[in-house]
Image (cartoon, rainbow, N blue to C red):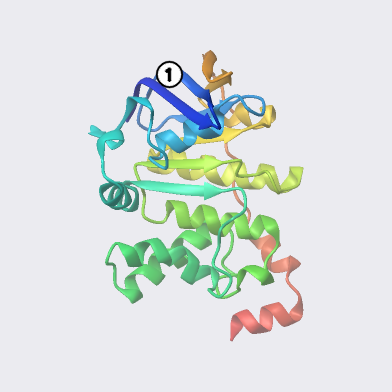
């Protein structure tokens, strides 16, 4: 699904040139859960930006689904990302004035799907994330874990070929992290989506099929796991139990 050849990224800082990536070759097959780890400054976020087409390489290429995104114009890249890629962010990136349903349905609007259909698809995805009672709540009315699950629902709702995640549990506690990672893993397996995650948390790599470790902009190790963590079933009923009476009344209305 993803082919990386000779990928190099050099930044100019004043009069100096700094190599963030020093020539990387990778092949990531369809349906693989790939975790990129490394210390701060190792180049992992730069690599993710390159894979997602958010930055142009200095040299080399990134091919996704047979299409060389490194050679695309910004307009072509925007269309490609809209049609084939999904993103999960550490800071959730939800629009504060929109409800959970509206946030999740947003990518579908850009794909030209009608309002009734896209909201139906968004509701289905939110239910799968255990947020059936939070559909009409805005981000400020939800916990961090709930907001991140809305962000995950938004990334998966259009069933993209590839989803990129940048520190998706960086703002969550350990219990919520397990819930969120289980939800992600379940959806990845169900829909055979290629999932590429960058994290500094080594524990999270246990969920991945493959762990790529970067150091100083090059691949230090590339390991496959025979027995990654299996997703736990996402339980939605506690969401209802944790809601206040006022929340339940508002939702029912």
Secondary structure under tag 1 reads strand
Q: Quadrant of residue 220?
A: top right
Residue 217 position, x and y percent, is 53, 20
Quadrant where the C terminus lies?
Answer: bottom right
Seen in the picture, residue 154 relative to 115 is either above or below; the reply is above
The residue sitting at 52% across, 62% down in the picture is 127
User: Is residue 53 found left or right of 83 in the rendered image?
Assistant: right
Side (left or right) of 219 relative to 118: right
Residue closer to the observer: 11 or 233: 11
With 114 as the anchor, is 152 left or right in this view?
right
Q: Which residue is mark 1?
A: 24
Going 68% across and 78% down the picture, which residue do you hit?
248
The residue under the point 60% across, 72% down is 138
Figure quadrant of residue 229: top right
Counting from the top left corner in percent of width and height, residue 74 is at 31, 48
What is the count of numbered marks?
A: 1
Residue at point 32% right, 26% down? 61
The answer to whether 127 is drawn above or below residue 37 in the figure is below
Q: Is residue 135 visible?
A: yes
**x and y, in percent, of residue 209 in the image:** 50, 25
Q: Residue furthest bottom?
A: 253
From the image, which quarter does the N terminus lie in? top left
Vertical relation: 32 (above or below) 110: above
Visible in this render: residue 224? no
Say few, some or many: other residues with alpha carbon within 10 Å of mark 1 (under 14 / 14 to 19 / 20 or more): some
Q: Name the quadrant containing residue 23.
A: top left
Pick the front one: 215 or 26: 215
Q: Nearer the viewer, residue 5 or 1?
A: 5
Q: Residue furthest left?
A: 66
Q: Position of residue 92 (x, y in %)?
A: 59, 55
């Amino acid at each position: 699904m993803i082919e990386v050849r000779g990928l190099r990224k050099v930044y100019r800082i004043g009069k100096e040139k700094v190599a963030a990536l020093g020539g990387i070759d990778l092949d990531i097959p369809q349906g693989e859960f790939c975790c990129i780890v490394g210390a701060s400054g190792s180049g992992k976020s730069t690599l993710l930006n390159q894979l997602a087409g958010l930055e142009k390489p200095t040299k080399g290429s990134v091919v996704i689904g047979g299409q060389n995104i490194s050679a695309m114009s910004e307009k072509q890249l925007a269309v490609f990302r809209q049609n084939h890629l999904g993103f999960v962010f550490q800071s959730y990136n939800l629009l504060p004035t929109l409800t959970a349903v509206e946030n999740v349905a947003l990518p579908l609007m850009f794909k030209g799907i009608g309002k009734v259909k896209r909201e139906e698809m968004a509701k289905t995805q939110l239910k799968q994330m255990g947020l059936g009672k939070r559909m009409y709540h805005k981000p400020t009315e939800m916990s961090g874990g709930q907001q991140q699950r809305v962000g995950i629902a938004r990334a998966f709702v259009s069933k993209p070929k590839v989803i990129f995640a940048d520190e998706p549990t960086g703002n969550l506690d350990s219990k919520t992290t397990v819930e969120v990672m289980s939800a992600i893993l379940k959806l990845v397996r169900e829909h055979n989506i290629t999932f590429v995650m960058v994290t500094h948390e080594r524990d999270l790599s246990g969920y991945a099929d493959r762990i790529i470790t970067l150091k100083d902009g090059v691949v230090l190790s590339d390991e496959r796991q025979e027995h990654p963590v299996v997703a736990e079933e996402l339980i939605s009923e506690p969401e209802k139990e944790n809601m206040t009476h006022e929340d339940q009344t508002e939702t029912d209305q």
